[in-house]
Image (cartoon, rainbow, N blue to C red):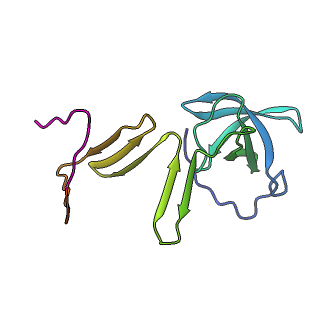
Amino acid sequence: MDNKIFNLENRVSTTNGRAILAEVIEVEHFEATNIYLPDVNKEVNVFAHSSSVPALVVGDSVLVECIASNYIITHRLRSKGEAPHQGFTLNDDGSLQVKNAEGILIQSNASKIEIQKDGRIMVDGKEIYSISDGKHRLQGATIELN
């Protein structure tokens, strides 16, 4: 998908600034390529996706903005009963709690920490330091050292 930047000033939205509810009818590489607009009984091509839109599948309900005849998906709606896939909570003590059903990846250049949904935690980097002021304990069914 080509990313194009254009000036939105002085352009009239055909939706008068309102979001339109649509259904995803075609997907390529987890991005919608075509959507159905039930209010006007029309299928249209998707111009772009907002950076916060997660991977999409056929049948997803989405909110769309139409700007200069270009349809931009801004949000995916959760299915009834579907829990949020991600959540960030700032605790009273200032710590941050992150929840995501699919896993979490923290990456910076060639180093990363990955928490997978199956319970595995992967730490990968050029050098890894584990420092403790008190007891430093490793516990597991088996522990391998090369």
Which part of the image, by quadrant, shows the C terminus?
top left
Tell me the residue at 63%/44% (across/down).
Answer: 48
Residue 140 included in the magenta stretch of the image = yes
Tell me where residue 36 sits by quadrant: top right
Q: Main secondary structure of the magenta part?
A: loop
Residue at x 61%, y 50% (from the top left corner): 50
- Residue 8 higher or lower than 63, as above or below: below
Residue 135 position within the rendered picture, expressed as x and y whole percent measured from the top left: 19, 58
* Residue sitting nearer the eye, 73 or 76: 76
Q: Residue at x 28, y 45 (%)?
A: 123
Quarter occupied by the N terminus: top right
Q: Is residue 68 left or right of residue 125?
A: right
> Is 86 colored magenta in this rendering?
no
Q: In front: 69, or 50?
A: 50
User: Depth check: 76 or 64 in front?
Assistant: 76
Task: Spot the residue most to the bottom.
Answer: 93
